Amino acid sequence: MAVLWLLARLPWGLQRRVGHLLGRLLKPAMRSRRRAAARNLELCLPELDAAAREALLDRQFAALGVGVFEFMRAWWGRIEPIEREARIEGLAPVQALLAQGRGVLLVSGHFTTLEMCGRMLCRHLPVSGMYRRHDGAVMEWAVRAGRLRYATAMFRQEEVRAAVKHLRGGGVLWYAPDQDMLGKDTVFAPFFGIPASTITATHQLARLAGCAVVPFFHRREGGRYVMRLGEPLPDFPSADPVADAAAVNRAIEAMVREAPEQYLWIHRRFKRRPPGEPPVY
């Protein structure tokens, strides 16, 4: 942890260069993850030929390498020089919702930029987060403490009541429902046209808290960050959790198409299949 804390303080330009080098090393080293990412690209972006997908895979691992430093800098480093060049769009409508006393659930995906952009967004909105507990006690303590430097609160995934209370009180909660969570309440909903096991927590949180659900787009362009708060999802929640899961997946798919190399393709998004469907990995 001490070494990571020191690496978080390297100059941003050096971190990006070292991160790209790290990405080149990660690609051959992470064989099973590389195969999963390649298969995901083949499934989700069939319009790309094999050469284009391989080039995108290279950029994915470069983004992962830089992402290691993005996470460390967000948790333990300084972001002021980077923040000056960042752009955030769509703040005013969300601020208006908060002024009315309505909670806002920010929905995003697992991108390499999520921690840096989350920290920068906290300078403008009182954002809390929902996360999965880390297995290691030291990492759990360090990451939670790092996030609480800028987030209003951090809720573990099992702390649903506290998260609902926060939203009902007019709070902002960031949540990423785009991974296949074993043992959770899930439905199959299309993601890039493929049935994906999708957690229904977004539907449930919105139903229980009466909050607006707002897509949070974020990406890195070179060394500069671009963030956008989209329009609230219309007629959300509905009475149909499957339709709501599909709406959330469409929003995340739109985010991925804006910055495909920065999405976490190494996650086996389609590891669970509908009954009777063959495995894809």
Image (cartoon, rainbow, N blue to C red):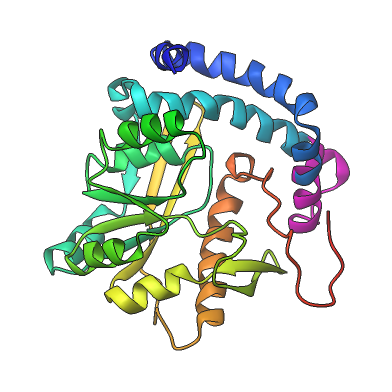
Q: Residue at x 42, y 37 (%)?
A: 115
- Magenta-drawn stretch contains 96: no
Q: Which residue is at the front of the view, 16 or 181?
A: 181
Q: Is residue 231 above or below residue 257?
A: below
Q: Residue at x 30, y 66 (%)?
A: 161
- Answer with left or right where residue 110 lies relative to residue 99: right
Residue 162: % across, % down: 27, 62
Q: Residue at x 27, y 49 (%)?
A: 127
- Answer with left or right where residue 49 lies relative to residue 110: right
Residue 123: % across, % down: 23, 39
Q: Residue furthest front?
A: 137
Q: Residue at x 39, y 39 (%)?
A: 117
Q: Residue furthest bottom?
A: 239
- Answer with left or right where residue 55 lies relative to residue 223: right
* Quarter of the image where the N terminus is located: top left
Where on the picture, by quarter, is residue 94? Answer: bottom left
Region rendered in magenta:
37-54
Q: Is residue 152 above or below residue 280?
A: above
Residue 173: % across, % down: 31, 56
Where on the picture, by quarter, is residue 8? Answer: top left
Residue 51: % across, % down: 85, 38
Q: Which residue is at the front of the view, 162 or 236?
A: 162
Q: Which residue is at the front of the view, 187 or 255?
A: 187
Predominant SS of the magenta segment = helix
Number of numbered tags placed on the structure image: 0
Q: Which residue is at the front of the view, 206 or 59?
A: 206
